[in-house]
């Protein structure tokens, strides 16, 4: 399935969820740089132009870098939906309710996005990311570091 067909699949799934109240869940799976976030943001932007979608959607944004487990994610959902103000000191009750509600809706539906980068492009990207800039505070360290990165990069080409 190409990227365009995956996008259309995601768009339709989100539209049916917002407009018809279907209980859909989906995992978008792929390595860094495989356009997971861009795909989702584009789909949401397109859908939020539709009045029938806009009036039914509550967005919650989570990051696996920040919300590393279910409990932290549920707390963030509670915060973003401003549910902690609704129940005062009973936030744990809301978390338990959300946990049951959210987990019961997960399906095994997945969209896999593969990176189109070649090994050489990955290697060059890693070299670029690992190389310290000229204005790094410790110039002696940065020169030695960059030399090591360069040697490793050259060695990986053989």
Image (spheres, rainbow, N blue to C red):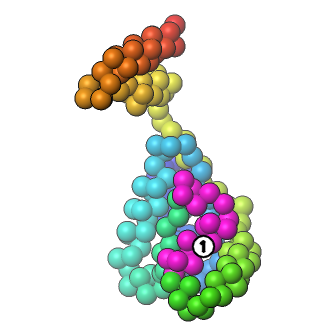
Q: Is residue 40 left or right of residue 64?
A: left
x, y percent for residue 3: 48, 50
Query: Is residue 26 among what the camera can see?
Result: yes
**Depth order, front residue of 118/146:** 146
| Residue at position x 57%, y 46% in the image | 30
| Residue at position x 58%, y 61% in the image | 67
x, y percent for residue 9: 54, 62
| Residue at position x 55%, y 43% in the image | 31
The residue indicated by pointer 1 is: 75
Q: Is residue 140 left or right of residue 126?
A: left
**Depth order, front residue of 57/63:** 63
Decide whether residue 79 is among the magenta residues.
yes
| Predominant SS of the magenta segment | helix
Helix, strand or loop for disc 1: helix
How many numbered callouts?
A: 1
Q: Is residue 132 left or right of residue 59?
A: left
x, y percent for residue 72: 62, 66
- Which residue appears farthest toward the left when viewing the image? 135
- Magenta region: 64-81
Position of 86 relative to 36 (above/below): below
Position of 62 relative to 2 (above/below): below
Splitting the image into 4 quarters, where does residue 110 fall?
bottom right
Decide whether residue 21 is among the magenta residues.
no
Q: Residues within 10 Å of mark 1 (few under 14, many from 20)?
A: many
x, y percent for residue 34: 49, 44
| Residue at position x 30%, y 21% in the image | 139
């Amino acid at each position: 399935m190409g990227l365009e067909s995956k996008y259309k699949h995601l768009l339709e799934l989100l539209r049916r969820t917002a407009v018809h109240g279907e209980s859909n869940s989906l995992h978008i799976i792929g390595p860094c740089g495989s356009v997971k976030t861009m795909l989702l943001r584009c789909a949401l932007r397109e859908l939020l132009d539709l009045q029938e979608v806009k009036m039914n959607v509550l967005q919650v944004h989570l990051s696996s870098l920040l919300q590393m487990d279910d409990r932290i994610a549920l707390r963030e959902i509670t915060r973003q939906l401003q549910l902690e103000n609704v129940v005062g000191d009973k936030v744990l009750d809301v978390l338990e309710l959300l946990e049951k509600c959210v987990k019961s809706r997960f399906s095994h539906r997945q969209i896999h996005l593969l990176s189109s980068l070649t090994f050489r492009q990955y290697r060059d990207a890693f070299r670029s990311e690992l190389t310290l800039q000229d204005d790094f505070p410790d110039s002696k360290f940065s020169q030695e570091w960059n030399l090591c990165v360069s040697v490793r990069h050259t060695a990986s080409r053989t």
